Image (cartoon, rainbow, N blue to C red):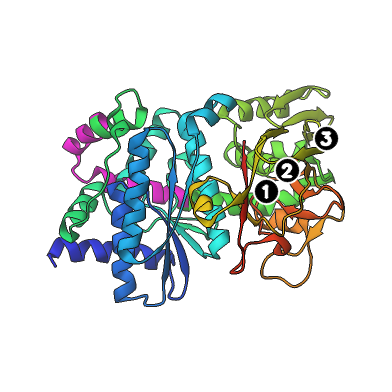
Amino acid sequence: MSHGHESFITKVQRTIDRYEMLGDGLTVVVAVSGGPDSVALLYVLVELRERRYPSLRLHVAHMNHQLRGAESDQDEDFVRALADHFGLAFTATRRNIRALAERERRNLEEIARRERYRFLRHTAREVEAARIATGHTLTDQAETILMRLVRGAGGEGLSGIHPVVDDLIVRPLLGVTREEVLAYCESVGATYRMDRSNWDPTRTRNRIRHEILPRMKALNPEVEMALGRAAEHLRRDETYFDLMVSQLLPGCLRMRDSKTLCLSVVQCEALHPTIRRRLLRAVLCRLRGDLRRITHAHLEAVERLLQSGMSGKRVDLPGCIVWREFDQLTFMVEEPSVPPSQDLTECRGIRWGKFQLHLRRGLSRDDVDAVTGEIVLDDDKLPRQLRVRARRPGDRYVPVGHDRPRKLKRLMIEHRIPVTERDRWPVIVNAKDDVIVAVPQLPAVATVAPGPQTRTWATITVSE
């Protein structure tokens, strides 16, 4: 092997070791789109398994976004063949991303990313994987930082792509550039697919990739490394700020009930603006479960409310409201109504709250491999009459791999279902006795899970 090949392996191994991404005996879901970055990721993990992790189990996962017609299908076939070439297990799913984006009136890339990670997390649960590996590179890091800089991001945004997220998602290629990836692919004889949309000049990332970053390289040939280093410094700073906020919160925040938090105005006003802004973000995140759709303008509005001194004023934010009551700010989840129970019948999709559910029964094993259902069940064990409802106090079921029931509330917490969504999360039950048979993004129910003796399958596709 060439010096460049060994240098690439060394850099990837250094990143893995530095962030403790892998360990022998782990199962890793490898996200492979078919492009050069993800193909290089798969090749290098296979190579490292041979060199250092003999018991590492790799499981290839691919999402067909259905955005490029036949080309998307060819990408899927290519990745399936690649997994077969290495003798690796393979899971694929399909999502009509364009239809989802139009229905939700949201950005294509945002919806694609959400659905992709939802699928990867689901696959990791199904195969009991400890890690999900993605092919983000140092070049992706540089592009991301520049995109966020143009949009006016703060320190957290400019900290870029994190090497490890939730002790689950890992990015082993963050220490190598795209140029190095292409050279590695050539050295191992790896072929890959090219996405024509990567040359679409209307996309901000593409303009940064093909116009801005090359000009910056003329000023500094190692600009990707420089931007990556800057992001690393910011991540270190953000870690310190997060620690400060976590130490401050118990003294100035109290919970009125499960949907309402109260923050001391006096204690908050005494803080440095940098810490105060992060404290407000932390309160909103704790209340809502995440910060999706919370913008700089929203935080500015809450800060103005804090500093106004006027009791009774309120600010409406996505998913919650904030108002001032004398010497405290009150944050409360604004709950839409809980959808009523609804029957789920075969071949007739239903809309339940923000979710679309579609049931298919009597499927063969091959049919299951081809469909997009997130929930796969043994059709012979599945009750004939199903219903979708909201969770109820005392809900519990026996997950696969367990011998006793577990509380639904605890499972939702463990699998990071946002607190603001739990009361409107679909629970699929036997219509006759109200026994739970499936819950999206949670472990399978033992009584209806497929096994070696399964003859016919059923799927329930759940999408927003």
* Res 455 quadrant in image: bottom right
Residue 417's disc is 1
Q: Position of residue 347 (x, y in %)?
A: 65, 38
Residue 340's disc is 3
Disc 1 residue type? Ile
Local secondary structure at mark 3:
loop
Disc 2 residue type? Trp
Name the main secondary structure of what is drawn in magenta.
helix
For label 2, the crowd category at 10 Å Cα-Cα, with few meaning under 14, some 14 to 19 and many 20 or more, is many
For the residues labelled 3 and 2, say whether their Cβ atoms are less than 8 Å apart: no
Local secondary structure at mark 2:
loop
Q: Position of residue 278 (x, y in %)?
A: 60, 41
Q: CA distance from mark 3 to mark 1?
A: 20 Å
Any magenta on residue 307? Answer: no
The residue under the point 38% across, 52% down is 32
Q: Magenta segment, which residues?
A: 211-235
Q: Which callout, 3 or 1, points at the residue further toward the start of the chain?
A: 3
Q: Position of residue 60 (x, y in %)?
A: 41, 58
Which residue in the protein does label 2 denote?
Answer: 425
| Left or right relative to 156: residue 299 | right
Above-or-below relation of 396 to 52: above
